[in-house]
Image: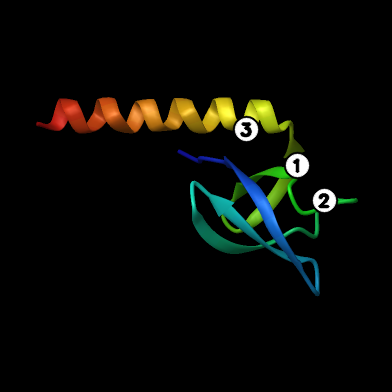
Amino acid sequence: MCLAIPAEVTKLLPDDMAVVSIDGVSKEISVALIENLAVGDYVIIHVGYALTKIDAHEAQRTLELLREIDAESREAAQ
């Protein structure tokens, strides 16, 4: 199964690279597939590549759903 998740662009780097934040965790990714990217934009990332931009509201909604799934999984494991 593949999982692509939203992340906020926090820094643009040379050579089509950027630093993104996923719930406070920073990761360097390739943004070669995205045009007109700016700090503060949200992107969908998968295996180190930004695939597309996503609306900030939709990104936050998706991250909240992932947090809920994580919390429910932890409760079920107890």
In the image shown, does 19 or 29 lie closer to the viewer? 19
> Mark 1 and mark 2 in contact (Cβ < 8 Å)?
yes
Amino acid type, residue under disc 3 in the picture: Ala
Q: Element type at marker 1?
A: strand
Q: Is residue 36 left or right of residue 25?
A: right
Circle nearer the viewer, 3 or 2: 3
Q: Is residue 11 left or right of residue 24?
A: right
Which of the labelled discs sits on residue 21, or is there none? none
| The C terminus, quarter of image | top left
Amino acid type, residue under disc 2 in the picture: Ile
Q: Is residue 69 left or right of residue 39?
A: left
Identify the residue under disc 1.
52
Identify the residue under disc 3.
59
Residue 31 at what x, y percent from top left?
A: 75, 58
| The N terminus, quarter of image | top left
Which of the labelled discs sits on residue 34, or is there none? 2
Amino acid type, residue under disc 1 in the picture: Thr
Q: Element type at marker 2?
A: loop
Q: Residue at x 80, y 60 (%)?
A: 32
> Quick one: label 3 or label 1, which is nearer the N terminus?
1
